[in-house]
Image (cartoon, rainbow, N blue to C red):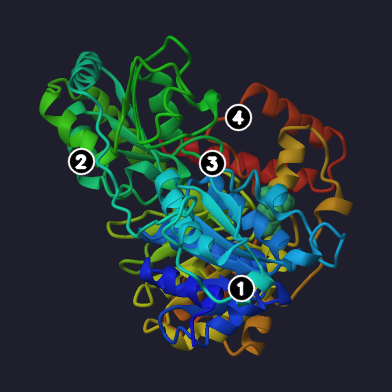
Amino acid sequence: MSENVAAFILNRLADWGVRRVYGYPGDGINGLLGAFHKVGERVEFIQVRHEEIAAFAASAHAKFTDEPGVCMATSGPGAIHLLNGLYDAKLDKQPVVAIVGQQPRMALGAEYQQEVDLIALFKDVAHEFVHVCNAPEQARHLVDRAIRVSLATRSPACVIVPNDVQELPYAEPPRAHGSVHSGIGYAKPRIMPGEAELRAAAAILNAGERVAMLIGQGAIGAEHEVMQAAELLGCGVAKALNGRAALPDTLPYVTGSIGLLGTKPSDEMIEHCDTLLMIGSSFPYSEWLPKEGQARGVQIDIDGRLIGLRYPMEVNLVGDAAETLRALIPLLEHKQARSWREQIEAEVDRWWRILDDRALQDANPVNPQRVFHELSSRLPDRCILTADSGSATNWWARNLRLREDMMAALSGTLATMCPAIPYALAAKFAHPDRPVVAAIGDGAFQMLGVNALIDIARYRDRWSNQQLVICVLHNDDLNQVTWEQRVMEGDPKLEASQELPDFPYAAYARMLGLEGIRVDHPGEVGSGWDAALSAGRPALLEVITDPEVPPLPPHIRFEQAKGFASAVIGGDPAAKEMVKESIKGKAAEFTNR
Ligand SMILES: Cc1ncc(C[n+]2csc(CCOP(=O)(O)OP(=O)(O)O)c2C)c(N)n1
Ligand SMILES: [Mg+2]
C-alpha cells in the first residue's frame, strides 16, 4: 500500500530529526492523526490540554534545544488557539513549525463549518513561510521549506493541509516542468563581521575607560568568550531577561538583570559608562540604555536587520556572538586601570546584600522576594528555570543567583502570561534527566496553568528525573498590573479588574496525584522548597504572598513616584500597606552602604 500524504509528512518530519509533535486533535487533522499509526516510534504525538500549550511547548523546545519545535492543530478553532504561543516564538526569534488542518478543498469558499482563512490568520505570525498543501507533490518541499525557513530565519513557519489532501496517496514530484525537488538538511552558517569592522570595534573598546557590557539570548553558548572579553575590558556585564542563563550570577562583575525588572548595579553601570558593548540582545527600553552621546557603542548581533536599532552604535558587527568575540579578543588590550571594575564589583556585592535584606523583611504573610531568595541557594545543579509574566518575574529576574550549566526561559518579548508550565513540560521532554523549576502567578495559573498541570501529571512517568517544582505565588491579585496602574497611571487599584477568586492550588495538585505543599508562613518557605525538591515526583509549591510588596524598579523615576503618590492619595484600598512596604524596601538600600 502506498504512503498517503499525511504519513509522508510525518516521515519527512522524522527525517529532519523531529521526534515529538505537541498538539490537539480535530477532524481537520484526522488524516495526520491516523498517520501516527503508520510511523511507529519515529514521531510521537504529545496531546496537551489546549493548543496554546502546544505552541508554547514547541517554542520552549526550540529555546531549550538547537532544534525546531513542532506543534499541530485542527482547522478553525484549533488553529486560532495556537496563535499566542506562535507569537511568543516569533517575538523571541525561535524556530517553530505549525502543521495545521483545513476543511476539504471542495468546501473552501463556501463559508463552510470551521472554515477560516488560515493564510490570512497566520500571515503575520508566520510571515516568513505559510503555505497550503494543495497537491501531494507539494508536500515534500513544503515540509522541507517550513523547517529550513524556520531555522534560517529563527521564526515560526506554517503548513496548512486540507483534510482531503492528507488522505491522498503521496506522489513524488515528477520530472517535469513546474515540479520541485527539495532535500533535507540545514547547517548553521558561520556568520562573521569583516576584519576592518573588528578593528574599528576593538579601537573603540580599547579607548573606553568605563565599558559596560549588555548581553542577551544571542550570547547563550558564548559564556567563555564573554568572560574573556569582560576580563580584558574590565567591565561589568548586565543581562537582558532572555540572556538570564548566558552567564552565571556567581561571577562578581555580573550586575544581573536590566530595566524595569533590573538591578541597581546594572542601572548605575549603564548610567556612568562611556562605552557600551551590546551582544545578542534586542533589549527594547531606551530609558535604561545610555543617553545618546554619553557612550560610544559597539554591537554584535547575528541578525543584520536588528542591529543598531536601540542605540546609535558606532560599529555594528553582524555575526555569531562566540565566533565574533573569538576574533575580537586578540585585538583587545588588557585594561590596566581596574577601578571601574572594582567599583562595579563592590556595587554588585552590596546589591546582593540589599536583596537578601529585602527578602527577609516581614510581609503579610510571606514576602514574595523570600520565595526566590530561599530557592536561590537550593537551585539543583543543571536545573532548567521557567518563569511566567507577572510580579514574580521581578523577583525571578533579581533574586535568583544562577550558576553554570543552568538554563532559563520566559516569554521575553511578547511577555505573555501562561508559558511557565508549558515551558516546563517541554523542558522535561527535551531533557528528562534535568530538574525543572517553574514560577507562576495565581492569575496565570487560573488562566492556563490549571490545564497545563494536568499535562504534567499525565506525562510525568516518562521522565527519569522527577524533580519538577511549580511554584504558584498566591496573592489573589493580578499584581503586576495592579502596580502598573498605581505607578504608571497614578490610579488606585481597580478591584473589579484586579482581584482573583480563591483557588486551592496545592490541594488541586494533590488531586492530580502530584505533591502539593502550601506555605503561609515566612519561616516555612525554605523547608517548603526542600520538600518540593525532594518529593520524588512533580510538586506544586503554593506560597501565600503579600501583594503590597512593590516590585520597585531599581530607581523610581519622577513620573512614577508622582503616580505612586497619586494612587495613595486617590484612595487605593491598600494605601497604608503599600507605603509601609515601599519604605522598608528602600531602607534596605541605606542600611547596606
Ligand atoms: C495573556 C496576557 N494577558 C494579560 C497580560 C497583562 N498582564 C501582565 S502581568 C499580569 C498579571 C499576572 O497576574 P498573576 O499571574 O497573578 O501574577 P502576579 O502579578 O500577581 O504575580 C497581567 C494581567 C499579559 N501579559 N498576558
Ligand atoms: Mg497574582
- How many residues crowd around disc 3 within 10 Å: few (fewer than 14), some, or many (20 or more)? many
2 and 4 marks in contact (CB < 8 Å) = no
For the point 68% across and 28% down, the residue is 561
Residue 293 sits above or below residue 39 on the image = above
3 and 2 marks in contact (CB < 8 Å) = no
Real-space CA distance between mark 3 and mark 2, rounded to the nearest whole angstrom = 26 Å
Q: Choose mark 1 or mark 3, whichever is in front.
A: 1
From the image, tell me which residue sits under label 2. 225
- Quadrant in the picture for residue 76: bottom right
From the image, tell me which residue sits under label 4. 556
From the image, tell me which residue sits under label 3. 261
Q: Which of the marked residues, 2 or 1, is nearer the chain's N terminus?
A: 1
Real-space CA distance between mark 2 and mark 4, rounded to the nearest whole angstrom = 34 Å
From the image, tell me which residue sits under label 1. 166
Residue 202 sits above or below residue 573 on the image = above
* Residue 575 image offset from top left, x and y in percent: 79, 43
Q: Which of the marked residues, 1 or 4, is nearer the chain's N terminus?
A: 1
Real-space CA distance between mark 1 and mark 3, rounded to the nearest whole angstrom = 47 Å
Furthest-front residue in view? 176
Q: Amino acid at mark 1?
A: Gln
* Residue 190 image offset from top left, x and y in percent: 24, 41
Real-space CA distance between mark 1 and mark 4, rounded to the nearest whole angstrom = 57 Å
Q: Secondary structure at mark 2?
A: helix
Q: Choose mark 2 or mark 4, whichever is in front.
A: 2
2 and 1 marks in contact (CB < 8 Å) = no
